[in-house]
Amino acid sequence: MCGNPSPSGSVGVLAARLSEHWTEQQQRKTIQMWSHGIASYDLFMWNWKSFFLEESSNKYQALRSAGEREREREMVVKHVLLAKFKEEVAAEKVEELIRGYANLVSVVPSMMAFHWGRDVSIENLHQGFTHVFESSFDSTQGIADYISHPAHLHFANIFLPALDKVLVVDFQPTPGPNPDPGN
């Protein structure tokens, strides 16, 4: 792969091409990854219309070098929130709050990704927590920017009163052992 061209005009060209097919969130994340050197311009432009639509695809993971994955892992900081909603909060309200949380990724610049899910553990160690929300940031400063962002502050004033329990943990993923591909 060749290196990234100078960012002066290339990011604008990339953004213009992506805007034809991608949502604003997909464009922002792609440009952010590219400008941080996680992937080269050639990789982004190779079948760019569909390549990054499903980042977890085997095709995407296979094409990324170990070095690219390591740089990405070093940059990413995870913000994990465990929640138990109050009994009196209606299911429709919970769904509305989850949509509001998910919308923050398109509003807060430092928020790179958002995932959520319900507890499905069979171990019964959930301590009453029913939902998990995970956000990805490029640094701990990105989390600080998120926490002080007006959209987050507004959302927190609506979200937190609906919770019976909450636990927040921020962490930087560590690399696991790198298996020898020959074995």
Image (cartoon, grey):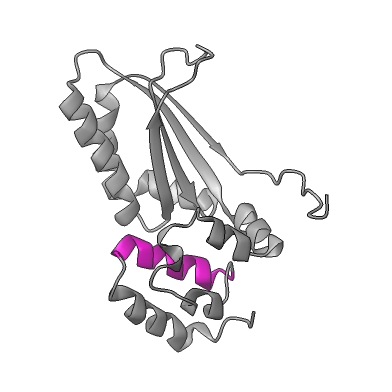
Task: Name the image quarter holding residue 82.
Answer: top left
**Dominant SS in magenta:** helix
In this view, 13 is above or below 21:
below
Query: Could you tell me which residue is drawn at 22 percent across and 32 percent down?
Result: 95
In this view, 125 is above or below 25:
above
Query: Could you tell me which residue is drawn at 41 percent across and 19 percent down?
Result: 129
Q: Is residue 158 visible?
A: no
- Residue 146 image position (x, y, % from top left): 39, 48
Q: Is residue 142 left or right of residue 150?
A: right
Q: Is residue 36 magenta?
A: yes
- Residue 119 image position (x, y, % from top left): 42, 23
Q: Is residue 143 magenta?
A: no
Nearer-the-camera pick, 118 or 4: 118
Nearer-the-camera pick, 151 or 81: 81
- Residue 52 image position (x, y, % from top left): 44, 64
Query: Could you tell me which residue is drawn at 44 percent across and 88 percent down?
Result: 9
Q: Is residue 107 left or right of residue 80?
A: left
Q: Is residue 161 left or right of residue 5?
A: left
- Residue 145 image position (x, y, % from top left): 42, 51
Task: Name the image quarter holding residue 117.
Answer: top left
Q: Is residue 34 left or right of residue 29?
A: right
* Residue furthest front as drawn: 183
Q: Which residues are magenta?
A: 23-37
Q: Quadrant of the N terminus?
A: bottom right
Q: Is residue 182 visible?
A: yes
